[in-house]
Amino acid sequence: MTSRELAIARSVIYASLFDYPLTLEQLHHALIESDQTRSEILAVYDGSELLHGMVEFRDGFFFPKGRADLIAERRRREAHSRAFLRRHRRALRLICALPFTRLVAVSGSIAHLNLEADGDLDLFIVTRGRRVWTVTVAVLVLTKLLRRRLTVCANFVVADSHLALDEQDLFTANQAIHLKPLIGDDLLDAFLAANPFVIRYYPNGITRLPDVPPASLAEPQGHGLARAKRLLEIVLRVPSPLVEAACRRLYTWHLRRKAGSWCSPDQVSLQPDYLKLHTRSHRHSVLDRFDAAVEYAFYQTGPDAVPRVTAGARG
């Protein structure tokens, strides 16, 4: 199997772990360790008997052979995701208006419009300066007041002075290229530049997908909210170090009390400018399942075809 065929197979298999068939545009964007163009992807697929035994291309979607059911599932989840986002539009607008938020992006399954029935609205936030703890506590208070605390999760908040991610593997890179900014779209380029490992895994990942949000996620921020945000940032500039210290002390105390219930404590980072709260992370299980799924898919095609590529998922 050629490296180009392998890239297509691995990319389709990875997406299928989330029950997500890929359009050609999405496959191009999320092509693992390959920079093929869209026309090249189609040419490689059309000319590969081995790929045809592993991957189907039907109704505009690529998916593992025999999994045509994923098309209907994707459409069902997309409809659910859009309704979910409409219900949370007000909360998203207000979170974007919080002082010192430079970038607010949806992440995880909702960024793909692939939310399951019990899914959450995960947020990745970049703050202006070292105000990570202040912004996180503000989001908690706001969502509590709006009765959205259980569904809106600001579980990854970093300062604009600490854009480099601590973990550099396929799972993290995939999360990064699928971030959908509500505000701070210009900062996303700086974020990707600070994490060159992302482009090593996804050479086409620097491009933006046109067929999914950000624009449809939330209404544009009005002039009134924007002015109020700027005014609050001016007012809070002087006391903000004290507020940040207090928020960090109190919220750290609260988090430590709950540490015993964390399913993935290794995915929690409580730094002054880098707050990662993936207490129920699927990172390890996804990478393990990916390794197993790739091996199984090739074994089904023929035992001699199993490639030695799985270790690359962890960097």
Image (tube, rainbow, N blue to C red):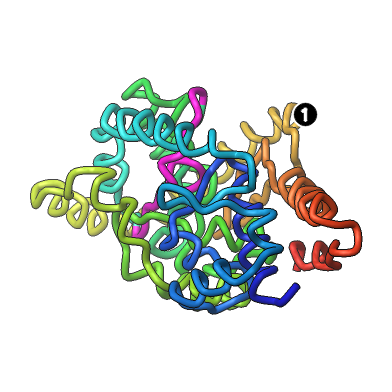
Task: Please give the name of the residue rendered at 28% of the width and 44% of the height, measured from the top-left corner.
Answer: 217
Residue of label 1: 260
Snapshot quadrant of residue 131: bottom left
In-image side of 253 versus 179 (left or right)? right
Task: Please give the name of the residue rendered at 39% of the width and 39% of the height, measured from the top-left corner.
Answer: 138
Q: Amino acid at mark 1?
A: Gly
The residue most toward the top is 147
Residue at disc 1, secondary structure: helix
Whether residue 105 is in magenta: the answer is yes
The residue most toward the left is 223
Question: Camera-side residue: 300 or 82?
Answer: 300
| Image quarter (top left, top right, bottom left or bottom right) of the N terminus | bottom right
In the rendered image, residue 89, in percent from the top left (x then y), is placed at 26, 35
- Which residue range is magenta in the image? 102-118
In the rendered image, residue 41, in percent from the top left (x then y), is placed at 52, 71
Task: Please give the name of the residue rendered at 36% of the width and 62% of the height, measured from the top-left corner.
Answer: 209
101 is higher (above) or lower (below) than 150: below
In-image side of 61 versus 1 (left or right)? left
